[in-house]
Image (cartoon, rainbow, N blue to C red):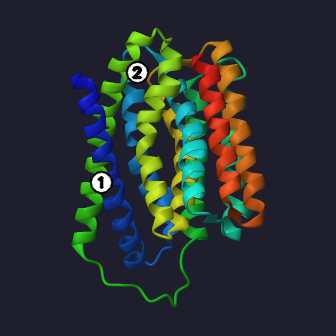
Amino acid sequence: MLEYLIFFLSLLALFLGAKLLTDSARQIARAAGVSEFVIGATIVAFGTSLPEMASSIIAMLSGHPSIVVGNALGSNVANIGLALGLASILYPIYVSRQITDIDIPFLLASVVATFVVFIDLRITWVEGLLMIAMYLAFIYHEIFQHREPDDTTNEGFDFRYLLGFVLGLALLYIGARYLVSSTIAISDSLGLSESQIAFFFVALGTSLPEIATTVTAARGGRAEIAMGNVLGSNTFNSLIILGSSSLFSVVSVDSSFLYATLPAMTLLSILLGFMSINNSITRLEGTLLFLIYCIISLNLIR
């Protein structure tokens, strides 16, 4: 019974943290003279992806690489199917031309990179370093491609923005940490495999910061943060989570699990690319993303 109470308290912490984070990110973006997309795709995406990174490192050190793969792929599927799906169902999301022309293709490139390194069902430290380098190129692009024009009027910086940002991250991390532990305790009795638990329960738990942040940003009319958060987080998961984990030990995965989940992540990423061509994600398209996520999850845990 205690694990259920912890589960719901963790959800509350996640949503409070998401509100603090998005509100602070908006103010920091204005004060720093950069676009909100950059904040969403880099700082916010990194912060909300810390639960995935922490759980993945612990899994590698504990000798459970399948949890790392399940967590990374499951988080990416949840980010698109749940985060963007639910957000666009509630509040249709506008997609800028820069995102469709440059950032969506980079997301697809990270998916291709994941496919390539998993050809032999494992990721070595050399491949991991290459994935990390690819992500650093993404960050470099975000900073210089999405900066505001020089004549942009910036607001003065207030340290309360930074305090709110840090408190938001803290709530997100604490909430995600206890959500994962309580979810695993609940799911153990279901008799699911380690990979299934990682893909569905652990990934869903660690992805709730992205889901909460994306929905909150979309509701507040900040589509740039909503899209930037998902694109940045998915790129981070594919390149940094998997890449950095391989520095501790070779990341290996069962072929049957990989062949069932990697195509699912690829399908959702490609659909997101096609949907973004018209510079918006409608309620109908959001419903489609959400339904695909439900089908994938039910097929995996049945």
Q: Residue 218, percent across and down?
A: 51, 63
Who's the residue at 44% across and 89% down the image? Answer: 153
Q: Is residue 149 left or right of residue 162?
A: right
In this view, the residue in front, 11 or 31, is: 11
- Location of residue 276 in the rendering, given as x and y in whole percent from the top left corner: 72, 59
Can you say whether 117 is above or below 143 in the image?
Answer: above
Q: Is residue 277 visible?
A: yes
Mark 2 secondary-structure assignment: helix
User: SS class of the residue under badge 1?
Assistant: helix
Q: Residues within 10 Å of mark 2 (few under 14, many from 20)?
A: some
Question: Which residue is disc 1 drawn over?
Answer: 16
Name the kind of residue labelled 2 in the image: Ala
Give 256 or 86, whichever is nearer the viewer.
Answer: 86
Write the residue at 65% across / 48% down: 287
Closest to the camera, between mark 2 and mark 1, is 1
Quadrant of the drawing holding the N terminus: top left
Q: Earlier in the sequence, mark 2 or mark 1?
A: 1
Q: Is residue 298 left or right of residue 97?
A: left
Label annotation for residue 268? none
Circle 2 sits on which residue?
A: 59
Residue 270 located left or right of residue 177: right
